[in-house]
């Protein structure tokens, strides 16, 4: 696959993750009497990753998340020269998805921006959790998210099942942490909605870059030990493709 195909796949995957996951929170979570609630939003985020990993994971590796890209690079699973281009298109995909979501959501009479599915701590946390709580949970959950990705895409894992494990892991992560930070573990997903919510949400955005990337770096280091494979420096992609196909 050429770089244009890979970057296009990352753009579309991150768009779908942001529009689908955040869209479920903005449009459906508290819909009168029939809202899907936290559980529904958590499932929506997991389904976005699962579906796009199968759709385009064999093209780009299915990162859809700057923290995943950084963590895979630290683990030796992704070329460092491609990290910045991947992150740029991931952020663009999330911002444009947030814009599309705003166009849809603002068409409802009485629409109020509120948090617009943005992440936050303190007064911006659904449960009013403080900065330390937000930092710890985002680092820990991103760490384990990357471990699931590294393990399920290693050369010894069953081929073709990685998107299921990764999608379920992201669902579990949201079930745990929506009340704390509204769940980031993805700087791009955090950036898109925050730019539209503005104000304090933008001011707190730094944490949702720092914490996920820190957790991903730690997981990358741990992954070098846990999932080392001398026969293959790059894992197969997230979809059911031949074992020797690299992630990017």
Image (tube, rainbow, N blue to C red):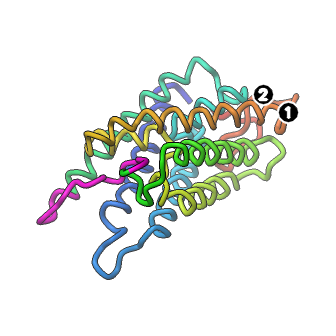
Magenta stretch secondary structure, dominant: loop
The one of 243 and 144 positioned closer to us in this rendering: 144
Q: In the shown orientation, is residue 99 left or right of residue 144?
A: left
Q: Is residue 211 magenta?
A: no
Q: What stretch is highlighted in magenta?
A: 105-122
Circles 1 and 2, Cβ within 8 Å, touching? The answer is yes
Label 2 element class: loop
Viewed as shown, does residue 191 lie left or right of 2? Answer: left
Residue shown at the point (55%, 22%) measured from the top left? 82
Residue 174 is situated, as x and y percent measured from the top left of the image, at 53, 58
- Nearer the observer, 57 or 71: 71
Residue at 36% across / 49% down in the picture? 118
Instruction: Look at the picture and state if 114 lies above or below 85.
Output: below
Vertically, is 92 above or below 110? above
**Percent x, y for residue 41?**
45, 64
Q: Position of residue 90 (x, y in %)?
A: 44, 35
* Mark 2 surroundings: few (<14), some (14-19) or many (≥20) residues within 10 A: some
Give the label on residue 229, or none: 1
Check if residue 118 falls in the magenta segment: yes
Answer with left or right where residue 123 lies relative to residue 1.
left
Above or below 199: residue 16: below
Residue occupying image coordinates x 26% and y 40% = 198
Residue at 72% across, 26% down: 76
Disc 2 designates what residue? 233
Helix, strand or loop under label 1: loop
């Amino acid at each position: 696959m050429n770089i244009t195909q890979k970057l296009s796949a990352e753009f579309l995957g991150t768009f779908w993750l942001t529009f689908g996951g955040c869209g479920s929170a903005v449009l459906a979570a508290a819909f009168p009497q029939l809202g899907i609630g936290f559980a529904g939003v958590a499932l929506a985020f997991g389904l976005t990753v699962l579906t796009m990993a199968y759709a385009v994971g064999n093209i780009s590796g299915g990162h859809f998340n700057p923290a995943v890209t950084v963590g895979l690079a630290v683990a030796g699973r992704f070329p460092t020269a491609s990290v910045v281009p991947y992150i740029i298109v991931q952020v663009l995909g999330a911002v444009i998805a947030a814009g599309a979501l705003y166009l849809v959501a603002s068409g409802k009479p009485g629409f109020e921006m509120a948090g617009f599915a943005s992440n936050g701590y303190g007064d911006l946390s659904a449960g009013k959790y403080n900065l330390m709580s937000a930092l710890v949970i985002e680092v820990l959950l991103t760490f384990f998210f990357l471990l699931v990705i590294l393990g399920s895409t290693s050369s010894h894992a069953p081929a073709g099942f990685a998107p299921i494990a990764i999608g379920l892991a992201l669902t579990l992560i949201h079930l745990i942490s929506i009340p704390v930070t509204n769940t980031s573990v993805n700087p791009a997903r955090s950036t898109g909605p925050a730019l539209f919510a503005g104000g304090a949400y933008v001011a707190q955005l730094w944490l949702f870059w720092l914490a996920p990337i820190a957790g991903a770096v730690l997981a990358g280091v741990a992954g070098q030990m846990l999932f080392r494979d001398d026969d293959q420096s790059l894992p197969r992609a997230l979809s059911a493709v031949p074992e020797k196909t690299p992630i990017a």
